[in-house]
Each structure stands twice: as structure tokens, then as C-alpha cells.
Image: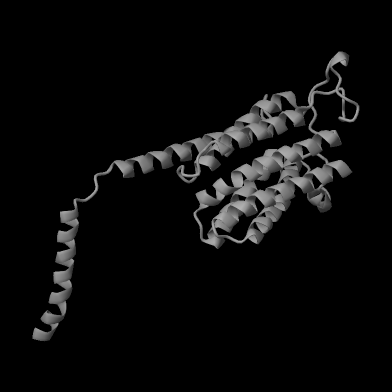
Amino acid sequence: MFAYNLLHVLAFAAASWLLARSFRRRGLQGLHAVLLCAIVFCASRFSARFFHALEVARPLQPWTSYFTFGAGPSSQLAGLLPSVAIVAAYALALRIPFAVLFDLAAVPGCVAIAIGRVGCQLAGCCVGPRLPPEWALPAWLSPSGNLPAPLLEMAAAVAVAYLLLRIPDEATPGVRASGFFVLHGAARFNLQWIRTGETSWGPLTTTQVLSLATVALVAALYFFVTRRAARARSEPLDHPEDAQRRHRRRGRRRESGPATEQRA
């Protein structure tokens, strides 16, 4: 349990540091990055526990279980739901575009997920199926006889972070955030097949259903935004002479207004 909590504290510290660096490059205070990561961290843990309780029809369990930061049952992808709302509200408070703040938080989010998955492996939760005896892992990786699904999720998060960093900073705002949601959602959907868990939606788990919904929604929004931006770029610009002509007409209207009032 100590290793689990320690790794999650390191995940919070790493995400806060990376986000604070991005904030300072844009002229924002690094303290806002730490506060945002702290709020998201607490809200996502609560949401993950609460959604799991709803999934197993035990929402009225002791309220303290929702705020437990140790290893235990949770619906991990559900933690993204309040995180999105919190980041959007924080962007509104800082008066910066939503897409810009989501882009800044994408890579730190991947780093936090990767480090946290190592804590899950050391705590022995979120395990995969049993391995043949000759494929057993080292004894310090608990449980050593199961497929290390959390380590595969860690590798997926690192791969997503690498792909996001390949996107240039000059790209359209929202591209990096869209890539995070689509790639992370697709990875979680596929990796769920090798994790032990309850299937609540036919052959699918709740995490897989949320992954599909996330990928579909973000892909649709990205397609809509990019097409709208492309249409705006393709529209012909006004000729300079037309703009000057409109400017002269507006000037004549302003001058004729007071003169008309005086004659009246």
C-alpha cells in the first residue's frame, strides 16, 4: 500500500511540474498548475470510486470509501469525466481558450497515468490473467503469476505521450487534446480485454463503453472543428479597396449625423 500511495504522489508531483512549466511559458502562474492538478487528482479518485459503486449497485456504502487513496476497486476511465469539467471551468476562470488548456494538460496527464499504473502493479490490483509457470514475473512484482496489465497500460500511456509530443506547438488548438482522448480511449478499450473485471454491458466492461463513447465524441468534435476552420481559411478575403470604400462610407455617415441634427 505504501508503494501505491508513493507512486501516486510522484504522479501528482510530475504532472504538476510539467504543467507548471507550460503555464510559465505562457505567462501564467505555476501555482495555478499545482492547484489544477490537485483538484483533478482528488475529483478523479472520487469519481472512479463512485462510478464503480454505481456499477456494482452499492452506491450507499460508507462515504469514506469514496475518498480512499489506497488500492481498491474503481472505474478508472470515469475519473476523466469530472477532470474534463474541472479543466474547462479552470480555463474559464483564467480566461484562456478551453482547447489551449486541454492541450497543455494532455502530456502531463499521460505522465501521471503512466506513473500511477506502476503503483497499481506494485499494489497487486488491476491484474491480468494467470500466466504459465515458466512465464512467472519476479516475486517483487505482485502478483508475479499474472499478466502485468498495469505495466502494459503504463507503456501505452508513454507511447501516447510520445505521439502527442510529436505534434508541433503551432498546430490548431485542440489537436493535442483530441489526440489524447482518442489514443488513450482506444488503448484503454483494447487493454481491458486482458484485465480481470466484471462485464456489465454484455461482453464489455463499463470502462470499454466509456472508452468508445469518448473516442466517438471527441473524433466527431474534432472533425467538426477542423472542417469549420478549413472553411474559414478557404473563404476569400475582402479586397483592400473594398475595405477602404466601406471605411469611407462609415466616415461620411458619422459626419452627416451631427449636421442633420443641427439643421433640424
Residue 85 visible in rendering? yes
Q: Nearer the viewer, residue 203 or 251?
A: 251
- Quadrant where the image shows the C terminus: bottom left
Residue 264 visible in rendering? no
Q: Quadrant of residue 249?
A: bottom left
Q: Is residue 127 left or right of residue 31?
A: right
Residue 34's place in the image compared with 218, above or below, is below
Q: Nearer the viewer, residue 152 or 73?
A: 152
Residue in view at x 65 percent, y 44 percent: 109
Return the x and y of residue 38 as percentages of the image width and height.
Answer: 71, 55
Determine the residue located farthest toward the left in the rendered image: 263
Residue 153's place in the image compared with 133, above or below, is below
Return the x and y of residue 172 as percentages of the image width and height.
Answer: 45, 43
Residue 92's place in the image compared with 156, above or below, is below
Residue 108's place in the image compared with 209, above or below, is below
Q: Nearer the viewer, residue 206 or 68?
A: 68
The number of numbered badges drawn on the structure is 0
Q: Is residue 140 left or right of residue 241?
A: right
Q: Quadrant of residue 11?
A: top right
